[in-house]
Image (cartoon, rainbow, N blue to C red):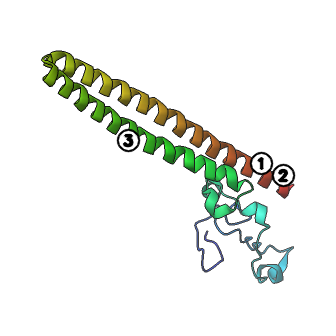
Amino acid sequence: MRCPNPQCNAELEPSDRFCPQCGTSMPAIPTPTSGSARAAMPPTQAPADRRLTAHSVLRRTIEHEGQAYPALLTQASLLVRTGAVLKWILIALGVVYCIYWIAWGVHGGSIGLGLLLGIGCLAANALLAWLLWLGLTVGGELLYLWLDVTKVFIASNRRQ
C-alpha cells in the first residue's frame, strides 16, 4: 500500500492510519457500512505532533532551530575554538623552547643536556597543550549538549 499524497508516495503498512513521512491520513477502505462516499473523501493532514518520525527527531543543529540562550551558544563555540588555537600556540612555544635549549647546549658545550632539556620542554608543552585543548573542547561540547537538552525540554513543554 502506498501513501495517497502524490509528493510522498511512501510504502505503508496496512495498519497505518497516517503516513509516517508526510503525515497524510489514509482513506478508509470502503465497507458495506461505510459506503463509497467516505472513500472518495480527499486525504487530510495529520496534526503536527503526529508527523514526528524517527528521522525528524534526530539532533538538529541549534543554528537552524533558533536559540533561547544565544550567549551560551557563542560561549560553547568559543570554548572549542579557543582550545584548538591554544593547543597550537603551546606546541609552537614548545618547539621554540626546544630549539632554544638545543642551541644553548650547542654553545655551552653540552649538546646532550641541551637536547634532553629541549625534548623535555617540547613534551611538557605538548602535554599541557593537549590537556588544555581537551578540557576546553569537553567544556564546549557539554554546553552544546546542555543547550540541546534544554531546547528539547522547552519544545516538549510547549506541545503539552
Q: Report if the CB atoms under discs 3 and 1 are less than 8 Å apart.
A: no
Residue 66 at what x, y percent from top left?
69, 62
Pick the residue in front: 24 or 36: 24
Q: Residue placed at 56% from the left, 44% from the top?
A: 79
Give the secondary structure at mark 3. Answer: helix
Q: Is 120 drawn above or below residue 41 in the view shown? A: above
Left or right, residue 80 beside residue 31 = left
Q: Return the residue at label 3.
A: 88
Mark toward the viewer: 3 or 1: 3
Q: Return the residue at label 1.
A: 153
Residue 37 at what x, y percent from top left?
82, 83
Pick the residue in front: 45 or 83: 83
Left or right, residue 46 beside residue 90 = right
Q: Residue placed at 52% from the left, 39% from the top?
A: 137
Q: What amino acid type should be assigned to the residue bearing mark 1?
A: Phe
Q: Counting residues from the N terminus, which is met first, the one under dot 3 or under dot 2?
A: 3
Quarter of the picture containing the C terminus is bottom right
Pick the residue in front: 26 or 59: 59
Q: Residue placed at 62% from the left, 48% from the top?
A: 75
Q: Return the residue at label 2.
A: 157
Cα separation, mark 1 vs mark 2, equals 6 Å
